[in-house]
Amino acid sequence: MANQKLARRYATAIFQLASEANAVEQVGKELRILSDAIDDNASALNFFLSPVVDRKEKERTLVAAFDGKAHQVALHTMLLLVRKRREGLLREIVAEYAALELAARGVNALTITSAKPLESAELRNIVSQLEKIYGKKFDVTQIVQPGLIGGLRILMGDRRVDGSVEGRFQELARTLFARN
């Protein structure tokens, strides 16, 4: 929780700087690319997260690799994280920044998890009903999780609605054990 709050603070500051530079989308995209590039390469991840590697060495490496190739706000974000020993927050900062981007466009994140892919008409129907109920527009991500057996799990920001078979069984078990 503390990491999420800290990541949100960093993301908010980065978002403000990117807004002032008229580069919100570009900075968000480049932060995602930088984060993915580091996460996808084991040696880069070890280098970036290692407390043993000198911070100046990390800074030189980042500048050599990304100066002129990434927006200055994105590059300086990476350098600031190294200086403050907050490299481990990068993934969370990118997620918080993405949420700020969506909110700026008046859209909220919505994740629908199901046991099998939903048909497009079915998905549109669910989303339109949720938009009517909550009075919001959603950017939808669909996740297929075969182990779910049946039903849906819906995640809207920090609100979770579990209508899956597994969720119903867990609710039933809680009810039964609460009576004893």
Image (cartoon, rainbow, N blue to C red):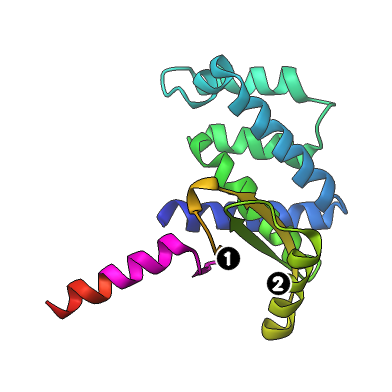
What number is the disc on residue 154? 1
Disc 1 crowd rating (10 Å Cα; few below 14, some 14-19, many 20+) is: some
Residue 122 appears left or right of 89: right
Instruction: Give the quadrant of residue 114.
Output: bottom right
Residue 145 appears left or right of 26: left
User: 176 or 54: nearer the eye?
Assistant: 176
Q: Amino acid at mark 1?
A: Ile
- Residue 69 in the image: above or below residue 119: above
User: 86 or 180: nearer the eye?
Assistant: 180
Q: Is residue 80 magenta?
A: no
Q: Amino acid at mark 2?
A: Ile
Disc 2 crowd rating (10 Å Cα; few below 14, some 14-19, many 20+) is: few
Q: Is residue 166 magenta?
A: yes
Span highlighted in magenta in the image: 158-173
Q: Which residue is mark 2?
A: 126
Q: Answer yes or no: do the residues labelled 1 and 2 have beta carbons within 8 Å?
A: yes
Residue drawn at (61%, 48%) of the image: 144
Instruction: Give the quadrant of residue 30.
Output: top right
The tag earlier along the polypeptide, 1 or 2, is 2
